Structures are given as C-alpha cells and as structure tokens.
Amino acid sequence: MSSVAELLLATLEDLLEVDLKTFKWRLTQDVLEGFPHIPVSQLENADRLDITNTMVETYGPEGAVKISLEILRKMNQNQLSDRLKNQYNEGETTEAAVQDKLKSYLKKKYGCIYEGTSKEGDFIYLDQIYTELHVIEGAWGGVRDEHEVIHLESRTPATGETTIEANNIFKPRPDQKKPIRTGLTLGIAGVGKTVSVQKFIHDWAEGKENQDIDFIFPLPFCKINSNIGEKDCSLIELLHQFFTVMVPVKTLGEGSKVLFIFDGLDESRLPLNFNSKVLTDDTKPASLDQLITNLITGELLPSALIWITSRPAAANQIPRQHIHQWTEVQGFNDQQKEKYFTKKISDKNLASRIINHVKSSRSLHIMCHIPVFCWILATVLEKLFDEAGSGDLPKTLTETYLHFLIFQTDRMRAKGNSVGSDNIVLKLGELAFHQLEKGYLIFYEEDLTECGIGVRKASVYSGLCTEIFKVEGRTSQKTVFSFVHLSIQECLAAVYVFLTFINCNKNPLVQQNSSFLRKLRKHQPMMNLLKSAVDKALKSKNGHLDLFLRFLLGLSLESNQTLLQGLLTQTGSSSQTNEEIVEYIKMKIRKNPSPERCINLFHCLSELNDHSLVKEIQTYLSSGSLSAAKLSPALFSALVFVLLTSEEELDVFDLKKYFRSEEGLLRMLPVVKASRTALLNQCNLSKRCCKALGTALISSHLKELDLSGNDLQDLGVKLLSAGLQSPQCKLVTLKLSGCQVTEEGCAALASALRSNPSHLRELDLSYNDPGDSGVELLYAIREDPHCKLEKLNVDHGRRCRLKSGPQKYACDLTLDPNTAHRTLSLSEENRKVEWTWREQPCSDHPERFEDYEQVLCREGLTGCCYWEVELSGRACIAVTYIGISRRGKGPDSRLGANDKSWNLNSFYDSYSARHNYKRTDIPVPTSRSNRVGVYLDWPAGTLSFYSVSSDTLTHLHTFHSTFTEPVYPGFYVGGDTGTVTLCQVE
Ligand SMILES: Nc1ncnc2c1ncn2[C@@H]1O[C@H](COP(=O)(O)OP(=O)(O)OP(=O)(O)O)[C@@H](O)[C@H]1O
C-alpha cells in the first residue's frame, strides 16, 4: 500500500502543467481554516516532488490530503479528487498509515516543553533546551537476582556502574543474555525522568531512534488515573481513547513491536494488585488495574515492551521479579550543568555569570545536578542579576523556590492582578495542598472554582498553574489543569499550610477543630504544626508528602519567612521551635523508618541547617540499620547529596563510620573527593576500587589517604599509582600498611613518585612484603633531591603479610621469665609455658605474679597484631596493661577480672570471655581445635579470638574497647596439665 506522500505525488503527476500552476497558486492562499498558506518563495521553483514534500512537512500527512482535496474540488478536478479520497481512505487503515499518524501526533505533543516562565504559555522546543542527562544502569539494592549480577559484572570498575543513554534503554547489549522486556527508571523529584521519556518518544516519532519499535503508547499515570472508577474496557479501547489515530486498529496481536510507557508511578492512584485475574486478550474488557498489571507481568501482550518511571519511594509497588532492567536518572553531571545554563540562557554573558555564581557556592552547585532546580534557579538568577543591588542570592532549596514564587507573583501584579487582598498565592496554595493531600496532580475546573480561582484567570497564573490538555475520561470532555511542575505544587502547598497556620491559627494537616475549640486553644505552638507534618509524611506509603515537608520545615526558618513579607501577618518560629523539631526528627530517625523516609528526614535536617546532621547519618548507618548492599543507587545518591550539601565541614571522611564495603566506597566517592582526609583503612576494600580512587586523586583536593589493612595487592597499588603520578594529585600522606604489596607494587609507587615528586611527604608501607629490592627502589627515590618524601615506613616486612585476613599481621612474641609465677616452667626459648608441681628456682622480681599462675610476654603491643597459641588443659589467653597488680589473691591481679585486662578462658571443652569481671560464655565451634588465634586492632579498639584449624579461622569472640596504652599478651596456666605454646605463623 502506498504512503500518503506517494498518493499525493501520483495525483500531482496527473495534473497538466497549467493546472499544476493553479494548484501551486492556491497553496499560497488561505485555502482551509486552520491551515496556514505556504509562502510563494517556497514554491517558486518547486517541482511536483518538492510540492509534495513541502505539503507533508507543513500540514502533516492527513492535513496534506485534506488541503489537496479542497484545492482539487475548487479546481473542479473531481475525478482526481475522488481517486485520492478513495485511495487515502483505503490506506488509512493499514498499519503503516496508523503508525505515520501516531508518529506525527506524538512528534507534535512531545516536541515542546512547557516552562511557563518568561512569557505567558511559553512552550520551548525540546531540542532547544534538552541537555544530555547522566543515566546509569544499576541494581535496586537488596537481594540481587541472576540478572542483576550480570549487570554488576558489566559495570566499569572506575565508577562501579554503567552509564547508559536513555535512547538505548531497550537496545540489546553485548553481554546481555535475555531480552529486556520491562524496564524501571528511578530518579528523585525533578531529576529528568519525564523529559527522558519525552526525548525517547520524540526521537522515535521523528524517525531518528528505535525504529524497530512499531508503536509507542505513552500512558502517564497522572493521565490514566482519571479512568479509575469508570466501567471496564479492553486494552484496545483504552488505546482508542487516548490515541484516536489508533481507532482503525482492532487488536494489537503479536505481529507488531509495541512499547508502553507508564511515566510517574509515584503519581499512580491505582491499587496495582499483581495477583489480579490473568488477562491475555487485548480485546477483552477488564478493570484499569487489571490491564496495567497484566501488561507489566507479561500475561497480556507478552512481546510488548514496558517502561515505567518512578520516584524511588514508590518503586516497590511493583514486585521485583517483573522488572528486567533498572536504570536511574542521576541528573546533570558538572559539564552537563554548564551546558544546560548555556543552552537555557540566550545572553552568553549572563549565562557565564550565572555559571560562575553557581560554581562559587558548594550547595548550589551540588543541587544543580537536579534539572528542575537548574530551571528554577536560572529563572530566579536571571531576574536577580537583572536588578541592581539584588542583595543576597538564594542558597537553599526553599529559598530558591520562594524567590521563584515571588517572581511569579510580581509578574501577576505587573499585569494588574491583585496579589494581596485577593491573595492569589494563598488560593493557588490551597488548590495545591488539597490536591496533593489526595495525591492528585491533575485537576478540573471545579477544583479551581472551589478554591476561588476563576478559570478565565487561569492564563494569568501560567507561570505556576497551567491548562495542559483537554480530552479526559471516556465519558466526558473536560479541561484539565496541573501545576507547571510537581515540585511547584509541593512548595505552594507548604506555603499555604504555613500561612494558614500563622495568619489564621489553623492547622490544615489535622481534622478541623471546631471554631469553639480553636478559640480555646488560641495560639497553638508552631511545633504542633511541624510535628503533625512529620507524622503525616512518614505515614505516606509512596512518599507523596516528602518534598512538601522539606519546604514546610524550610519555611519555619525566620530567614525564609522574610521572603514572604506581605503575605505574613507575623513571623512564626523561634530558635527553640527549631531545636525541638530537630530533636523530634532525630527521634523518628532512631525509630528506623524505611530507608527512603529516613533519607528524607536527613534532607529535612539539612533544610533546618542542623549541624549534627553528618553525625546523625553516621549513627544511623553504623548501627547496621542499613547495609550498603541494601541501599539502592538512587538512595545512595540522595545520601551523598545530603552529606555534600550539609553545612558541616567534611574535612575528614571516615568510611568506617558509614559502611565497611567497597560498594559503599564507590557510591560515596563524591564525598571522598570533597574531603581533605579519607580514612578508608580496614574497610574490606580490594583492587576493584583502586581505579576509581586513582581517578579521584586527580580530581580532588585529597591530602591524606589511608588504605591500610585492605587487600589491594600489587594490581590495586598500580591502579592507584596511575592517579598518584599525575601532577594534579596533591596527596601528602599515603598509608598502605598491610595491603599485600610486594616489590612489583613498590616499583609502581616509585615510578609514580618519579613523575610527581613534589607532593607526597609520607608513605607507609609497613606490614607488606616489599623484599630487599622494593625497599631499595623506594629509598633510592627518597634520595632524589626533587622528591619531597620525608617519612618512609617499610617496617615489619614478611612473606606472611601476603595472607588475607588478620594472619597477615603475625608478630613474634616471647614470654618474660621475670613475670612468670613460680609454678610455671618456661622452655623452648621462652615460647612454651607449663604448670609444674614443683616451684621453679627464681629470683624475687617486682613484676612476677605472686599469687596467680600467670605469665606475660615481653612485647607491649599497639597497631595491628596477630598471634597463635596451642593450648592444653586449663588455660587463659589474655592481654593486659602493664600496670596489672602482681600480688594478692584479689581481682586486681587476675587476668580478665579487672578493667586493665581482657581474656579468653579455655577450660577443656568450653570457652568464656572475661573483662572487668564480666563473663560471656561462648559456644564451642563444631570443629574445635586446641589452637587459638588472637587479633588485636589496637587503634580500632578490637581484640578478637579465633579457633584455628588447618589455616581456617572460626570467630569466637570480639571485645570492643578503647585502648589507652600498649597491651601485653599474657596467659594463665592452671593445675595439673595446663600448657601454652606460642606458635610460629607463616
Ligand atoms: N534533560 C533535560 N534537559 C533540560 N531540562 C531538563 C532535562 N530534564 C529535566 N529538565 C527540566 O527539569 C524539569 C523537570 O524534569 P522532569 O519533569 O523530567 O522531572 P521528573 O524526574 O519527571 O520529576 P518528578 O518525579 O517530580 O515528576 C523539566 O520540566 C525541565 O525544565
């Protein structure tokens, strides 16, 4: 079947030259209402093919046919006109024709973005403003399924994640084993999910991308919500309702490749019951919920592709087994932020001033990774830079949005609309709040009227609230409204709640008190309002009040209230209220709500400028409430965002206070980069993270990096050295103690220091196995006059340092005969002690244990140390401060019975641990062995005991303490058969 263009061309070819001239002339006139004429210049030298193309481009395929028919009618070319009409009607029902029509409909619909700012009803071409976004492919967190593991493997080691272009979401990848049917894209509010979807659709409709897909059906949740409660319909009827061009299609069947896009799951009001009745026929009526869930599960149209987007808090409405691919829109990276401002602001000079301003404020710069914030900020700064002496520029989320509201109300005022007495901000706020409470983002004329807003005036508010589309529901034709962006609705709702409370002493968040009760409780404290908002937001399942809460708390700060002057009759907060609400939020965090809710509460603390925020996050994470593996990339981004925008100094970043994992480190790299000292020691890191760390060394201000106690090996050190060798790396101290480094790693470090000799002053390579040649290489570098290296530590180098786990810290111990009780006999060069019946001939020594059968080692230990002992009979293994008493039968001189010593008691087939007389019984492991390993991490304050059998360590017990002086290993060796032997660990 011919395309529309072919039909038109065939018609024009049948016109005589003289008739063609008339046809052309008619095209330059107003032929049909609603269709523009074509300028004469465009048709001057046009041949038949040019005319065809120009008509299709100007009017679209359908319009071009309409115009042609009209002109032919006027020219009395009835035969040609009938033929075109018949052929067109025949062809209209073919799949190609329907696809053409769908494409031209979507091209028009998705080609523009509504920004409603500078001019009324301002639509901007998508291509004019669209800036590439950072989208990653990643896991959802929690238990990983087989599919996710595949993706994890494909992650680049540099960032731990794979970047993906939105247009490629459904394109097969080289490592992919199964086709991707259902994709879920997560992202925080305003990060660009809808715009990504829009770009995907537009590029398809323009014929640029994903042309293997035959039909795309965008069904945003906010739009299909309006069908809830209507009578059952089939999937095909639903499509006919939303896409009238689909009417000729009676079923989709299996023949064509179809993509359904469900944008904004967080806006869904459907119950989404995945156990609903199975539906396999697209012509069979069912409830809306059934249609959607069966599409997602693949019961209905199994070969259709499904793309869902959601804010993270609402994503768990879909069971994970139905999702084949997770992606996350992370917003703009640093270059993309600049690109956005350059594209958005036409005045290049102003754009670069704005970019410089954004770069000068850490929190603004970080927040600009969210596109909607960039847009609001660009609008606000454009205006403020324009006004001479504009005063302080906004720095926080609430401040920026309030400036935006003020800017919009000023615009309304300028148009002669009353903003004060008739208070439009309050009216719009009321509308925003009532709709948000119900979870509605789209509303009708009657909703506006209810809040005292006349529809006629709606265009006046086009910067804030806008009419967006007309056809709605299958039974009604209604005008539908929404706010320009959901975040603006959330901000206006908060302003309304706040103003109503301050000006009228009413709390819209709780059931209305009767006016009598209200009078009785005049002047309720602000704290009541804020508490009720926190409680209500925490109760929401999909987090629909999260951003609203942040705005409301932001408004409780006096500094932000000054921006609302003119709307407020008094200010409404005191520093006491702030302290109280901060404490209330912290109490809620400790009650351990879901990670999503919790991170929003951190955001709230940040909005309240709370200075203990970082500590609060550390306490929350180190309590083990949340492991790095359970936190989704989206939540990690949110956490990093909170940390980076916090008011607190991030000078020292200690990973142990958050997580001890590689996943944790890779996700928190932006925080590492923002710090001067990064303590990453003993965090279970491997060579996998070294490439990313090497890159971070070049692009950060890090001065000290401690990676001690991680099994990085030579390969890890080489990857790290790649960053170290760059002159941009300004690292002063590098600690790689106990990292399994050999001569090869030392050579890489030496070569890096030769390339970049002027910064590093301290290098700790103790507890590795550098060998003589490795040590020589590094000493030779230190002798180089250009090299600034002052402190080089290669102590305790041994082969056993290449082991993983605590055994790498093996140390040599010897018993001190001067401390041994008289019944203890030492042998094997003071490495063995046994109990004897007969007292040993020995001198009186002040350090000798007089009353308990105990002995100490000579070595006082600090740092990380590991030793093993072979026990038989009754014996205890302990560590003690040197000051333990040596006389008397009391607890002061008994190992484990006082606050100076910690011990593990081994008594035939039982174990117990004791410190300061507190006893913990320890279950005996199934593979009981007489060998016990002891690992002391003195700086971290841990002392661990293990049962050792054929090189395998089974954990018995760990003491947690704060050691304040060196500790000495010691033993109790009891009656009859007690023996302890210090073993060689290699
Ligand atoms: N890639 C982009 N290029 C330019 N501007 C963008 C881009 N992405 C988003 N924006 C701007 O940010 C605004 C918000 O983006 P969008 O609606 O896509 O966010 P969202 O993630 O869907 O948010 P929500 O979860 O709140 O619905 C857009 O209206 C647009 O002004």
Image (spheres, rainbow, N blue to C red):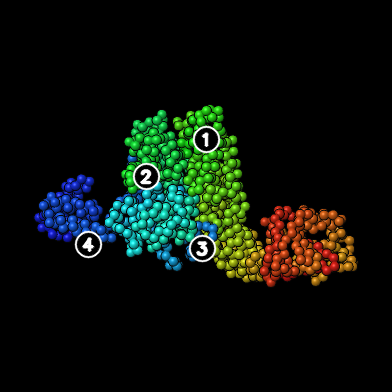
Q: Which residue in the structure is indicated by mark 1?
A: 558
> What amino acid type is highlighted by mark number 4?
Ser
Identified at 49% across, 47% down, the residue is: 543
Instruction: Give the alpha-carbon distance from disc 2 to disc 1, as whole Å.
Output: 30 Å
Q: Nearer the viewer, residue 681 or 851?
A: 851
Give the mark nearer the N terminus: 1 vs 3.
3
Q: Secondary structure at mark 2?
A: loop
Give the mark nearer the N terminus: 2 vs 3.
2
Tell how many labels: 4
Q: Which residue in the structure is indicated by mark 2?
A: 115
Determine which quarter of the picture holds residue 217.
bottom left
The answer to whether marks 3 and 4 mark residues whose Cβ atoms lie closer than 8 Å is no
In the image, the residue with mark 2 has its CB under 8 Å from the nearest atom of ligand 1: yes
Determine which quarter of the picture holds residue 283.
bottom left
Residue 208, can we see it?
no
Instruction: Give the alpha-carbon distance from disc 1 to disc 3, as whole Å.
Output: 49 Å
Q: Which residue in the structure is indicated by mark 3?
A: 145
Residue 259, can we see it?
yes
Instruction: Give the alpha-carbon distance from disc 3 to disc 4, as whole Å.
Output: 48 Å
Instruction: Give the alpha-carbon distance from disc 2 to disc 3, as whole Å.
Output: 41 Å
Q: Position of residue 513 (x, y in %)?
A: 51, 32
Q: Which mark is residue 2?
A: 4
Q: Which mark is residue 380?
A: none
Instruction: Give the alpha-carbon distance from disc 4 to disc 2, as whole Å.
Output: 40 Å
